[in-house]
Image (cartoon, grey):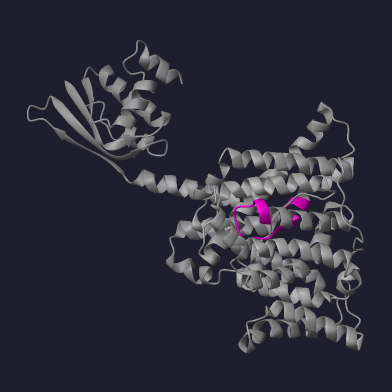
Amino acid sequence: MLSLHVYRDQWLGNVRGDVLAGLVVALALIPEAIAFSIIAGVDPKIGLYASFSIAVITAITGGRPGMISAATAATAVLMVTLVRDHGLQYLLAATVLAGLFQIGAGLIKLGYVMRFVSRSVMTGFVNALAILIFMAQLPELIGVPWLTYVMVAAGLGIIYLFPLITKAVPSPLICIIVLTAIAMYFGFDLRTVGDMGELPSTLPVFLIPQIPFNLETLVIILPYSAGVAAVGLLESLMTASIVDDLTDTPSNKNQECVGQGIANMATGFIGGMAGCAMIGQSMINVKSGGRGRLSTFCAGIFLLFMIVVLGPWVKQIPMAALVAIMIMVSVGTFSWSSIKNLRSHPRSSSVVMLATVACVVATHNLAIGVLVGVLLSGIFFAWKIAQIFRVTSTLSEDGGSRTYVVEGQVFFASADDFTASFDFKEALEKVTIDVSQAHIWDISSVAALDMVVLKFRREGADVQIVGLNEASETIVDRLAIHDKPGALERLMGH
């Protein structure tokens, strides 16, 4: 639990930077929230209300200060079928249930699974997101008036050159103000935020999803809620780890799970869709000087204020300004050093990184890419550990007994090599298996040990196992069958 002093500092430790960064993020959230609503097949206000609600609530309850959470494409794509087949009310119910799942995940400490995500997977995740962020801007750059390219180039120039003059105001905010002013003054015919969809003009209100409260409804929404909860947590925890690195500050992953759950559950009751952390917006926030909870809170409040009160002005913002910001985010997010490191890093790490990128970009599903990366990391790790294994032996002077010394890790990946290291046809009176420098890990290694002991006994040798450490002895005593009647028949039967 956070102390009151630390929590207060997360709110008030960077007031000016957080407020300005929140304003920039709010402006960039509007077109994305509208776009994600369109993806899910619902009215734009559903995504806008969700972005406001999730940002404000995660600022209060989340575990990663400075991270932006709102409606996202990762969760929106999972809801398309539900909305099409059953309608908006079922979407709201699924959002509430997804929030409950996420709260449960936080309470059972599921946030600790992030320790199994390797650095290679994280790099692949970041690079894939950078590519997806850039690809998402292509519709705004293809088949558009040439003036759009001029405005985007001007926006990038402001973003990268303005900090040379002063860093007192975030350059993305200056980009939005200047390009909007130019477009309005000269009356340029450019695509604007208003062209993305109608902005709501009223505040959200509390409502209970109008659905039958029965088992049939639960069966309908359960798969969607579980998917949204899993993908939302995965993206949120990965993004939290990235922000940890960017800001050199820790975060509470389990608290973030609970915070995301509370935000989604509450959002479902005000007519919003589910969401999660946004890597692109979080990068904008951090690069604009946002560090604390106040930046996320301001992003949500400013978003609601702008769409409800300043809607007519916000509609005039040219998409070129926001495209320039997102290109800046894409370039800044991509780990350019990872390309140079492909030759110097271990081949397995490079394969994991590239596979993660390829899967995410191909499927546009962050969860699939990360799971593939984690799976490959596990396989490569098991293979490496399996190589750190050997069995040596010495024969007694009289030739009647042999001592085998096992070194390394005996588990499912090295069990076959373990069994193959023994000569069962050698005529011996006694065999000693010394495992004082080894560790027995799982049922596969216990079964291999059983097989070795039983095969030697079948050849008439007396077998003794020595040197088991406490953990190995526990699992061997519990699972081994070589001292039980009919052991060989039972083992061969399985």
**How many marks on residues?**
0
Describe residue 314's horizontal placement relative to residue 463 as left or right: right
Q: Pick the residue in front: 138 or 310.
A: 310
Can residue 356 be seen in the rendering of this structure?
A: no
Q: Residue at x 32, y 36 (%)?
A: 439
Furthest-left residue in view? 397
Give the image location of residue 329, x and y in percent. 66, 71
Instruction: Give the magenta range.
Output: 59-76
Furthest-front residue in view? 5
Residue 165 drawn in magenta: no
Q: Quadrant of residue 113?
A: top right
Can residue 423 be seen in the rendering of this structure?
A: yes
Give the image location of residue 148, x and y in percent. 82, 81
Give the image location of residue 155, x and y in percent. 74, 82
Q: Residue at x 84, y 77 (%)?
A: 318
Q: Residue at x 11, y 27 (%)?
A: 399
Describe residue 191's horizontal placement relative to residue 463 as left or right: right
Give the image location of residue 95, x and y in percent. 77, 44
Furthest-top residue in view? 485
Vertical relation: 292 (above or below) 110: below
Q: Residue at x 73, y 72 (%)?
A: 24
Q: Quadrant of residue 157?
A: bottom right
